[in-house]
């Protein structure tokens, strides 16, 4: 029983970390610009992944603890830029189109899965690990679309949460929160939590090599 639990500990820790990083991203969304850093959701994603993998024993090299947040921030930046190229002028005002969400989610998923798996010690060839990332990356695109579609439900529920805590902008009302803010909140929650579960699943079936 204990051995079975140990097998699933990385996936469980990653899922919890996904929820935590999404909530932190939402909570920091209204911080003054000088207190935030560019593409902070990607950095928070990487920090929590690094911490959970370190606690589970999957990361054996200290430098990888630092490299994963850098790689995740880069992935968020590239996904943001690439996805933006596919945005549609016909999408609902203040929201992002499904095409943009799919491409951005797919790009981010591929980069996150490939870079993190390549940073881990493994007996699997790098070509196989990159191929795994290619095969699973459409899940990230689907998560992006689902997150966008849940903007008016899950996103608004998250907005009400941060609003009740006094973290929203003073001039932001319920009406203008129904656009980009609520959609981004639901995207962060769905994509980050879903990608953590997927990452845990992929790593679960990636044989880990012995530390040097």
Image (tube, rainbow, N blue to C red):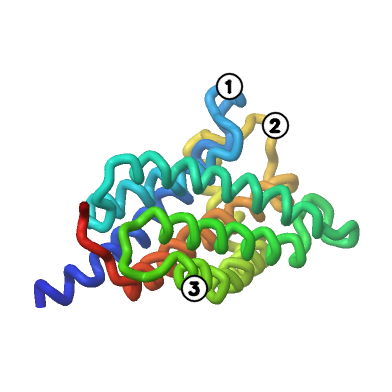
Mark 1 lies on a secondary structure that is helix
Q: CA distance from mark 2 to mark 3?
A: 45 Å
Label drawn at residue 132: 3
Q: Residues within 10 Å of mark 3 (few under 14, many from 20)?
A: some
Q: What residue lies at 29% left-to-right and 59% top-to-bottom? A: 13
Label drawn at residue 79: none
Q: Residue 144 at what x, y percent from top left?
A: 62, 64
Q: Nearer the viewer, mark 1 or mark 3?
A: 3
- Evaluate if marks 2 and 3 touch, with contact meaning CB atoms under 8 Å apart: no
Residue furthest to the left in view is 2
Residue hosting label 1: 34
Q: Height in image: 36 above or below 193?
A: above
Residue furthest to the top in view is 34
Q: Height in image: 210 above or below 61?
A: below
Q: Residues within 10 Å of mark 1 (few under 14, many from 20)?
A: few
Q: Nearer the viewer, mark 2 or mark 3?
A: 3
Q: Residue 124 at what x, y percent from top left?
A: 36, 70
Q: Nearer the viewer, residue 211 or 113?
A: 211
Residue 98's image quarter? bottom right
Residue hosting label 2: 171
Q: What residue lies at 57% left-to-right and 71% top-to-bottom? A: 134
Mark 2 lies on a secondary structure that is loop
Nearer the N terminus, badge 2 or badge 3?
Answer: 3
- Would you say 79 lies left or right of 31 here? right
Q: What residue lies at 80% left-to-right and 54% top-to-bottom? A: 85
């Amino acid at each position: 029983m204990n051995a079975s639990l140990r097998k699933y500990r990385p996936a469980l820790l990653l899922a919890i970390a996904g929820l935590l990083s999404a909530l932190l991203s939402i909570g920091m969304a209204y911080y003054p610009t000088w207190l935030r850093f560019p593409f902070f959701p990607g950095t928070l994603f990487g920090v929590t992944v690094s911490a959970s993998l370190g606690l589970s024993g999957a990361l054996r090299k200290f430098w990888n603890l630092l490299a994963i947040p850098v790689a995740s921030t880069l992935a968020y930046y590239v996904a943001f830029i690439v996805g933006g190229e596919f945005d549609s002028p016909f999408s609902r005002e203040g929201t992002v189109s499904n095409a943009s969400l799919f491409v951005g989610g797919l790009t981010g998923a591929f980069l996150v899965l490939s870079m993190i798996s390549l940073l881990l010690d493994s007996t699997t060839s790098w070509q196989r690990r990159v191929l795994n990332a290619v095969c699973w990356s459409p899940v990230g695109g689907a998560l992006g679309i689902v997150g966008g579609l849940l903007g008016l439900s899950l996103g608004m529920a998250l907005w009400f949460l941060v609003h009740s805590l006094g973290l929203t902008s003073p001039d932001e009302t319920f009406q203008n929160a129904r656009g980009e803010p609520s959609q981004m909140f639901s995207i962060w929650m769905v994509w980050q939590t879903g990608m953590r579960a997927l990452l845990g699943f992929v790593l679960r079936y990636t044989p880990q090599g012995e530390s040097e």
